[in-house]
Image (tube, helix red, strand yellow):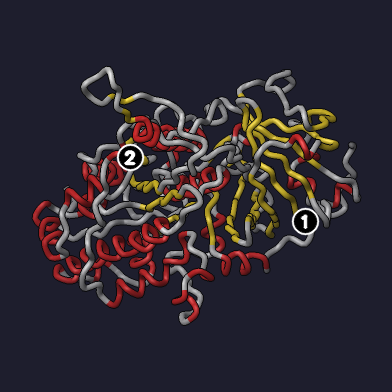
Amino acid sequence: MASCGKPLIPQNPAAKLALAGSLSDDEDLVVKPTPPRIRNLSPSSTTAAITSILHGGIASSTIQVCQTIPQPIPGSQSSFLQKSSVQPHCFHKESSTSDYGSGDDGDSSLPAGSPPVHPGELLALTLEERQYEKSRVFHMSTPDPTKPPKYRVYKLVLTGGPCGGKTTGQDRLATFFEQLGWKVFTVPEAATILLGGGVKFGELSKEQAYEFQKDLLRTLLQLESVYFNQASLIKDKNVLVICDRGAMDPSAYLDADGWDKILKDCALEMFELRENRYNQVVHMVTAADGAENYYTQANNATRSEGIAQAVNQDTHTRNAWVGHPYVDIVDNADCTKFDDKMLKLLQVVCDRVGVNYQDRLSKNSKKRKWLISGFDESKFPKYEEFSVTHDYLLADKPDLQVRIRERCQNNRSTFTITTRCFMRPETVETRMQITEREYNRYLSMKDSSRATLHKKRRCFNYGNQYFHLDIYVDPLPPACQGHPLIILETYTTKPYGDKAPELPDFVEVVREVTKNEHFSMYKLAKVGAEPLTF
């Protein structure tokens, strides 16, 4: 059992992941009570909360208080070299990266046909009274298309042991659901904020340690309440709120008496924190349990656990959520590479939410690409479109690639940094969200031998397959030499050269370019690159 007063050790940028799941039919029929009140937030906790609110997806232009405070700098952020260092557990082969993850060709997008319908909503819509029966019955049917769609707020906790995949998983989930047309908020980890601001737990007395844990819980709840409130105000789309750890996690680092005392002092009830605050909890098992060769302390400055201690903490964290109605454990079984665990994570959340993902999240799904000469705009199905910009940065090692990305829709942007290290036999890749300030700082490290890539990305479904269409825009990549470039991509279990999957009938396919390295983003961006053969 962890000693009383031990801080909730945060997990910063890294590499880790996993999953599985299904959805309860009556999940949405449960009335959710008002979140617990939070009293007497200390000055340190208030400051920590304010300085991190804007890093979870809330636009500064929509919050009046942002006009009176300076742009925040997250205390938990590490240096560029720390961000771009290789984390051995975050690895996958280039040929099998997820379309919602990374890879040399960037991230993909997911179309948003009609908004996903939650099974619980179907049941709520179809409860009916039949004249020939004395009691009401449930009858599953489709919603009335004449009525406006019911949008929902889905609150998800990502928790787990050290080096389990939490941070990278949060980023992958955000990208996936944004491409479905959802609004996504990512709640930062409270412990990272507080410890990153200079708190040294080893220097605290017993009383100070207890007060720190209490402030940590209050800060966590206050941060979540901000995002939960913002999510409730969005009426035109579904909203996913991803919490980096949840309200029950601090109990894994306290004995029973210490946890009970904190709950009493904060006027909180464990039942409300555990059962009714979140729709789903996903536990990412530490790499120290089942993937020991990839467990590392290098990707998180606040992580100090050895393998045995990491497994112990993982167990306590998992036990903290026993009793929640929808807990999914994503372990390292059958994961031969990092991306396998990522795909499992996406699958378990999609299963709970009710999103149909066909085979695009299958472990043996591979990316395939086709060169397109044109398309019929009039036949294009419903799609989500993003403006995407990629820049490569100067790296301190010849076998390391670092790139940053801005993805914009409706004047709202998200920013990502990706590092790729070519280590035989695998390509090690990590990816994380960054702030706009950090993005602008990284731009000063831009590799002048690589041009900025600009494209419009259309994400759509065709039949049972998900596609995205990358339309490169001016200024075109150097390798194009002024020639328009359009690339169609999808993930499928069908091998290279197979006639399946069926390609959209409104695009003009020139040929498949899956194994042609000249059509990779890295090659396309090279100044003075050999001209492409169209």
Residue 453 position in % (x across, y down): 75, 53
Please tell me which of labels 1 and 2 falls first in the chain.
Answer: 2
| Residue 67 appears in the rendering | yes
Question: Judging from the image, what secondary structure is the residue with disc 2 in?
Answer: helix
Gap in angstroms between the C-alphas marked 1 and 2: 49 Å
Mark 1 = which residue? Answer: 450
What's under tag 2, amino acid-wise?
Answer: Asp
Residue 54 position in % (x across, y down): 47, 66
**Image quarter in which the C terminus is found:** top right
Nearer the camera: disc 1 or disc 2? 2
Front-most of 164 and 455? 455
Mark 2 = which residue? Answer: 28
> Is 47 drawn above or below residue 502 in the view shown?
below
At 62% from the left and 28% from the top, the residue drawn is 465
Residue 307 falls in image quadrant: top left
Front-most of 332 and 217? 217
